[in-house]
Each structure stands twice: as structure tokens, then as C-alpha cells.
Amino acid sequence: MDKFIIHGGKPLSGTVRVSGAKNASLALMPATILAPGKFNLSNTPALHDVVTMSALLESLGCVTQHRDHTLTVDSSNVTKFEAPYDHVKKMRASVYVLGPLLARYGQARVSLPGGCAWGPRPVNLHIEGLRRLGASIDLDSGYIVAKAKRLTGARILFDISSVGATGNVVMAAVLAKGTTVIENAAMEPEITSLAEFLIRMGAKIHGLGSSTLEIEGVDDLHPADIETIPDRIEAGTFLIAAAMAGKKGGAVRVERCNPKHLGAVTNKLEDAGAKLSYGKDFIELTPPEAVRPVNVMTAVYSGFPTDMQAQWIALMSLAAGKSVVTDTVYFDRFTHVPELQRLGAQITVKENRATIIGSKELTGAKVMSTDLRASASLILAGLAARGTTEVLRVYHIDRGYEHIEVKLKGLGAEITRVRSEEF
Ligand code: EPU
């Protein structure tokens, strides 16, 4: 298993390019099941999660090819309708095949995802939404077994705004008979990009980007192509790396991102004292002299993303004062905290709230990744720390950041990937 060795404290400057969004790709890919034929998804990032989703689509009968960041999916011969436990336990987003399989083939058998690294993440809303569309759904030996002759449009009001449940229900409703209205739908850009893709395939969806989606079902869809939107979380992670690196490097330009998707993060970075300038597809950040403490509360889009919470805590551990970071989306997503403490960060967690007393300096140590965003926060802290940091189990980072060490090296960081026997 690989680990990263980081010699911290190097100034960062220059330009870094953002890849396509993992969480957009993971929704676009299963949507190809909805129509037979060949799809081209350009700007698809080379990530482990994309490989895992490709393998799942292949196991259903699709043929996939990923070359030069274009993923081609041929969904002409889907003959299986099951997402086995082995896939779903590797990656929860495997649940996304449920809606499309059910809508197009009238059946799906998808393993329940169970817990994840930071606690329970249920799929009850996915199931309730699909039931509302007329699917019969049973739970059998850890599997969701769903059947429907033809789904029928319905009014669905989600108790909680859920990215995955919205994605699954939209993908099912596009082929249902009649109109579906989803209220309290997720407004994340990844869901909007999924809806845009479905419209290109012939679906009729109104209200994109709002919390009410109206879907007029159609009888069939056709293949289409789309360019994957930039990864707003990857972009935000590089901005925080730049803010933590201090003044001596100068500015870092994060290119090929969509600044409109990053408003909550860039506002908070400005509050923390960073200077930002914006172009159509880039953000340039000049680090502050001293990072100001800034409280953050995560929320659904367009609020501050939970996927940036761990990285923000890393930044705040260098702030000149006390800050509070509250996660309202996932109540116990704080596995990075004990590891950040090993680097000298002063953080206490109570319920879903982390209180951070910033210090002038972090010091290098051996730390362990526990999940994707936790790994990102440890790398950020290691880059800013004095001395050497070893981040073990970096397979988590490869799920969601494309060649992060290469991109960081391009900015002047000293970070090396090495093979390691340590687990
Ligand atoms: N929830 C339920 N029931 C459900 C579904 C969700 O109670 O049936 C709750 C969750 O427990 C959570 C909240 O609703 O408290 C929101 O969860 P959501 O369903 O929106 O999350 P998700 O679709 O499983 C996606 C991203 C996550 C990201 C969340 C929140 C993908 C593949 N994953 O997950 O990304 O944290 O939305 O924005 O899109 C990551 O990239 O590191 C990551 C974990």
C-alpha cells in the first residue's frame, strides 16, 4: 500500500489544473443504463471510484473504455441487474444503478451499503422515493430487491435534501409514465449536471438547480455526450493548501474550475484573510499574512460543503485564534481530528462541533488516512507542518483526487509517493 512522505513548510506558487468532478461522474455513468448505445463522457477523472463504477457497469453487461479522460460507455447489452455487496461496500455510489435499472429493465437487486468510515449513511430516502413511483421494494438478505412493470409519476417530498436519493429518483422518473415532482431536491451542481445529461438524452426535466424538480416521463431515451463539470472539492482543497502555505510563495492559481460552484468556500477564505481574484474558469489566491479564525457550518449547496469540512479544520489549526466548525450534514465525520492532533493541532470535538485553537505551527508526524476528505486534510496539514509527515493508507486519496502529489509538486510542494508495507 502506498504512503506519502511530505517535507512540510515549502512555499507554494504557480498554477494547478482541476480534474472532472468525481461525484458528477459517479452520477453520469449509471445514467447510461437508461438508453442502449454509446455515450462519451469527456473530462472524466482517472480515479479509483471511476474504475469501481466502470467495473460495476461492466458486470451488468456494459462495455467501457477510459482514454485521455474520455470515458466511453456502450450500454447496448445490459443483461444483469445486480450490484453485489463487494461493489457496494467498496463504494456507496454503486447504489446509483438502482433507479436506472428499475426504470429501464423493471428490476434491480442492489446490496445495502451499510455504514461507512464515519458512521451510518442510510438509503431510506432512495427506497421511499422509488416506492412512491410505484416500485415494489423488499429487503432480502442485505439486498434491496426492486421491481416495477412501469414506474408512474408521483409527488415526492424528501424529508432531508439528499444528493444520492435525488439522483436515483430523477433517473427513475425520466422513464416513468406521467409527471413526477420532487420537492426538497438536492441542488448540488453534480445533480444539475446529471439533469442536463438526462435532458440531452431526451428527458424532460424542469427546475434545474432549484429545490423543486419537475420531470415529465418519456417512453425512451437515446445516447448523448457530455463534458464532466470541474471538481469543486478538489479546487477548494488546492485553495486551502495555498492559504496554508503562507506568504512566501506568492499566489496560486487554480485553473479549470467553476468559481460559481465555490462561493461558500471562497467567501470563507476571504474572511480568513486570503486575497482572491476570479476569472471565468480560475481562482487565484494570495495567502494571508496570518490566517484569521473563521467559523464554518456545513450545509447543502450552496452552503459550505461537508466535503470541505476536514480541510477547513486543517486550515483553522493554523489560525490566530479560536474557531468552531459544525457539520450539519454528517454528524460524526471527524475521523481526521485525532490524526491532526498528532501533528500538534488543538481540536476538541463535541457532538457535531469541532473547536479549534489555532497555533503558529504544526509539526510533522506519522498519520493515517481514514477516508477520502480526511486524507486530504492530513496532506494539507503535512504540507504546512515543520519537518516530515508520513500519510499512510493513501488509497483513500486515490478514490477522489487525481494524481494529487503530482499536482502539488507542480506548485512546489515536497511530497513523494512510496510503496509501504505499513498498513
Ligand atoms: N440521508 C438519509 N437517508 C438517505 C440518504 C441520505 O438520511 O436515504 C442523509 C445522510 O445520512 C446525510 C444527508 O442525508 O446526513 C445527505 O446525504 P446525501 O444523500 O446527500 O449524501 P450522498 O448522496 O450519499 C453525496 C456525495 C458525498 C457528499 C454528500 C453530501 C456522491 C457520490 N457522494 O453523498 O461525497 O459528502 O453527497 O454532499 O455524490 C465525498 O466525495 O467525499 C463524499 C462523501
Image (cartoon, rainbow, N blue to C red):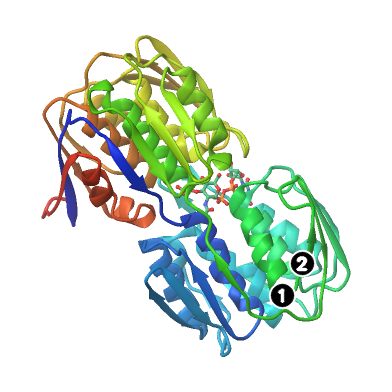
Q: Quadrant of residue 160?
A: top right
Residue sitting at x 29%, y 39%: 14
Provide the secondary structure element on which disc 2 rests: helix
Say which amino acid is labelled 1: Ala
Q: Is residue 381 visible?
A: yes
Count of numbered circles in the view: 2
Rendered location of residue 316, percent (x, y): 37, 21
Check the image and report above or below for 255 versus 81. above
Residue sitting at x 51%, y 65%: 94
Nearer to us in this view, 400 or 118:
400
Label 2 with label 1: CB-CB less than 8 Å: yes
- Badge 2 crowding class, 10 Å Cα cut-off, few under 14, some 14 to 19, many 20 or more, is many
Rendered location of residue 59, percent (x, y): 46, 81
Instruction: Quickly name the residue at label 1.
Output: 103
Check the image and report above or below for 83 versus 272. below
Q: Check residue 168 in the rendering and tell me which mark sits there, or answer none.
A: none
In this view, which residue lies farthest toward the front?
279
- Badge 1 crowding class, 10 Å Cα cut-off, few under 14, some 14 to 19, many 20 or more, is many
> Would the CB of label 2 be found within 8 Å of ligand 1?
no
Q: Quadrant of residue 365?
A: top left
Rendered location of residue 230, percent (x, y): 49, 52
Instruction: Quickly name the residue at label 2.
Output: 173
Residue sitting at x 56%, y 90%: 77
In the rendered structure, the answer to whether residue 34 lies left or right of residue 378 reads: right
The quarter of the rendered structure image containing the N terminus is bottom left
Provide the secondary structure element on which disc 1 rests: helix
Check the image and report above or below for 389 versus 397. above
Whichever of labels 2 and 1 marks the residue nearer the N terminus, that label is 1
Residue sitting at x 87%, y 64%: 179
